[in-house]
Structure formats: C-alpha cells, structure tokens
C-alpha cells in the first residue's frame, strides 16, 4: 500500500511538472487540476476580497476603491504571495517581455508635466531636436531586435498630433518597418483623435501608450496643461480603433498611498483593462519641479505591482523608468509578484536604462527567459 501511494504521488508530480503554465484561456482546466492556495487574513473582509482575486478565472472591471484598498493594505508578504498565485494562473512566470523605448522627437513639449525633462516649461538644459528619420529609427529597431527585444516603442515629445500630417506619415512608416522585423510596436505620441488612431491601426500598430500618471485627485498637482479626462479620451479613441492600450503611472511624484490605489482604480475600471501597465518610479531630473523628491521606498513599488497583478490579472505589468535604481533582488521580487516586462536597451527617452546584456544575464540567473513577440494573449483570447 505504501509503495502504491508513493507511485501515485510521483505520477501526479510528473504530470504537474509537464503541464504548461497557461493563460486564462485554459485556466479553467488548470484551476480544476490545481486550485489556488487559500489566502489567510486577519480581516475576514480583506481575506474575502483577496481570495476572490486569487480564485479569478477572468478579469473584472467593476472594482471599488474600497476593494482595491483592502488588497493594497494586505500584509506585504501575503500580498506578494497572492499576486504570485494570480500571476501563475494567467501567465507563464518564467517569461519576461523585453521592450526597448526610442525617442523619435526630443524636447520642446508644450506640456508642463512636473516630472519631465522634455517640457519647454522647465529649464533642464535639454535641447529640442527635430523628429528623427525613418531610417534612423529602423536601424535602432534592428539593433534592439538583434539584442533580444521583442517590442519596440516610439516616443515623441509633443502634446498631440494636430497638424502633424508629415510626422504621422513617417510614424506609420516606422511602424510598418518595425512590424516587418517581427516585433511588436508601441508608440506614445500624446493625444490622438479617432481618425488618427485608425490610421495607426491600419499601419499595424500593436499598442498605444498613454499613461494616466496618478490618481484623478492628485493629477492636477502634477500637470495643468492636459486634463485627466483628456487622457481618458485618448485611451478610448485608441481602444475603439482596435489598438491595445498601454497605460500606467509614475510613483514618487509626492503622492500618498491612496493615490496608488486611485491610479489602480482608474486603470482596473476601464471598459477593458490595459494590455500593458507600466509602473514607473520617478527619476528626479534637475530643472524640473520634482527634482528634490526623495526616492520612493521599494516596498511601495512592490505593493503597487502586486496589487496591479491582483486587480488586472490578464495585463502585462512592466517595470519601466527608475528600474535601474532597483537592486537585482528587488526586481526579482517584483517578477515573482506579477511584473512580467521591462524596458531594456541604451536609453529610456532621456534617462538611463539597464542594458540588454545585463538584463539577459539577470534573467538567466533567476531561471527566466525573454517572452516571444505576440506570444501573450489577452483575456478573451485575442492575440496582441
């Protein structure tokens, strides 16, 4: 009898080892075979909210601020464990998306974003430059591709696309060229209307980045030249055009924990969750109003990443600006708690970025590997 029990246990172990980590598409089977571990809590209400998140087989967009607050305020070790459980139900925890961000138009922006070196309102010493050529961008994209990046992102320092027909034409050529290399392509071009979004979609754009930055309540203290609702309007135009939405925020702007909750509330209650959610840590830049801000504690970053994973289980959660200041062990803890993308390469627009070689070596040390282009799937089954 003892030998029979051991044989049965060994067979089950081998089956579990062979089973692939899956997206929500086959998570019903995974959930049946291996239900998620229970989540304990000193608060029955908090435990109930977190337990429902851990048990979820599909994203939900009807979160309340109180629910997100309860998850966010869960003991950090318990929260990280719960987020790791959610992550494994919706994603392969060994895969990290490598993204490279390229600046196609530097400086001279008319916005007054308090954190940004490219605003014409701030004296940062950054010189405004014209838009770079299509060939220059495609050469940079090829280099990123050769170094293992599977998503190439284009950023332009301007408020919107009004009156930029030539620029839009060039951006579309860049998109087509990047897609021709087999890479995903994302752009961040400020505000776009419905017609412009459709043109970008027709060019083959994978995703459009438009961060909401912070909570609705704290936003006016950071930016005055573009309203929160204008940001949401651009996100709606992009989504209606059939382009995946990339939208996240920046931590360390002087906000309070309730603003992290408010940020996640905004993103998790959109009609569809963003396909990717960049979590940036402020890089204080001399000459900007926020140059004197102190670094945010790592625990706040981890708590935000883990909560984002719990409330937006199908989204890619990306460690973006400021990652270079994080220790490798801190990054690994974020990966465990649900982050599954990074920016890598030579530059993050105007700030420093971890390099390809360093990131590849880090992933290897932790038993991880780059995600392939277009290999992820959104909840609902649409490949992006």
Image (cartoon, rainbow, N blue to C red):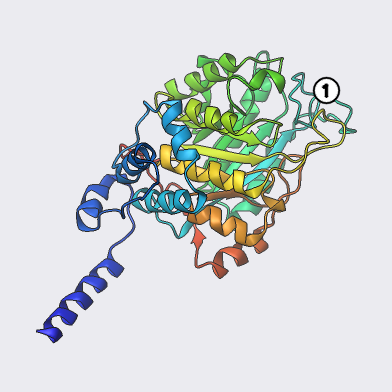
Q: Residue shown at 41%/31% (left/top)?
A: 67
Q: Choose top left, top right, bottom left or bottom right for residue 248.
A: top right
Quadrant showing the N terminus: bottom left
Left or right of 37 on screen, residue 109: right
Give the residue drawn at x 60%, y 45%. Answer: 301
* Residue most extreme to the left: 1
Q: Seen from this angle, which residue lies furthest front?
A: 42
Would residue 312 be visible to someone looking at this image? no
Can the viewer see residue 101 in this picture?
A: yes
Image quadrant occupied by the C terminus:
top left
Question: Helix, strand or loop at disc 1?
Answer: loop
Residue depicted at 51% across the width and 43% down the height: 317
Question: Which quadrant of the figure has residue 269?
Answer: top left
Callout 1 crowding tier (Cα within 10 Å): few <14, some 14–19, many ≥20: some
Q: Residue 86, relative to residue 120: is it above or below?
A: below
Residue 264 x, y percent position in the rendering: 51, 32
Measured from the top left, where is residue 29 in percent x and y? Answer: 21, 52
Is residue 27 shown above or below 264? below
Q: Considering only vertical position in the picture, is 304 above or below 226?
A: below
How many numbered badges does the structure rendering display? 1
> Residue 358's spot in the image, x, y percent?
67, 63
Nearer-the-camera pick, 267 or 348 = 267
Taking depth in this image into account, of 41 and 225 the one nearest to the observer is: 41
Q: Is residue 205 left or right of residue 326?
A: left
Residue occupying the point 47% across, 57% down: 95
**Residue 111 place in picture, x, y as percent:** 74, 20
**Residue located beneath label 1 in the image:** 120
């Amino acid at each position: 009898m003892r030998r029979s029990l051991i044989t049965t246990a060994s067979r089950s172990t081998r089956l579990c080892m062979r089973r692939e980590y899956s997206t929500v598409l086959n998570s019903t089977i995974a959930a049946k075979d291996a239900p998620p571990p229970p989540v304990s809590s000193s608060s029955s209400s908090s435990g109930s909210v977190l337990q429902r998140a851990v048990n979820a087989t599909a994203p939900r967009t009807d979160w309340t601020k109180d629910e997100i607050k309860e998850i966010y305020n869960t003991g950090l070790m318990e929260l990280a464990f719960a987020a790791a459980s959610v992550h494994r139900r919706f994603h392969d925890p060994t895969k990290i998306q490598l993204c490279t961000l390229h600046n196609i138009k530097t400086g001279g922006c008319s916005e007054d974003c308090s954190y940004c070196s490219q605003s014409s309102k701030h004296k940062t010493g950054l010189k405004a430059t014209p838009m770079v050529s299509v060939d220059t961008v495609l050469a940079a994209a090829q280099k990123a591709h050769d170094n293992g990046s599977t998503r190439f992102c284009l950023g332009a320092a301007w408020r919107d696309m009004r009156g930029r027909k030539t620029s839009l034409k060039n951006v579309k050529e860049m998109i087509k060229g990047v897609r021709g290399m087999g890479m995903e392509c994302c752009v961040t071009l400020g505000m776009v209307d419905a017609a412009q979004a459709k043109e970008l979609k027709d060019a083959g754009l994978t995703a459009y980045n438009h961060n909401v930055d912070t909570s609705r309540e704290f936003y006016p203290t950071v930016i005055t030249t573009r309203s929160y609702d204008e940001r949401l309007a651009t996100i709606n135009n992009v989504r209606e055009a059939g382009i995946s939405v990339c939208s996240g925020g920046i931590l360390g702007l002087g906000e309070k924990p309730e603003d992290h909750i408010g940020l996640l509330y905004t993103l998790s209650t959109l009609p569809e969750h963003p396909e990717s959610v960049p979590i940036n840590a402020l890089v204080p830049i001399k000459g900007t109003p926020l140059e004197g801000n102190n670094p945010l504690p790592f625990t706040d970053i981890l708590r935000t990443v883990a909560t984002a994973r719990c409330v937006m289980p199908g989204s890619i959660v990306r460690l973006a600006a400021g990652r270079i200041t994080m220790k490798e062990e801190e990054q690994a803890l974020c990966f465990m708690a649900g982050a599954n993308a990074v920016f890598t390469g030579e530059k993050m627009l105007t700030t420093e970025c971890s390099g390809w070689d360093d990131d590849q070596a880090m992933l290897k040390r932790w038993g991880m590997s780059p995600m392939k282009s277009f290999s992820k799937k959104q909840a609902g089954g649409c490949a992006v």
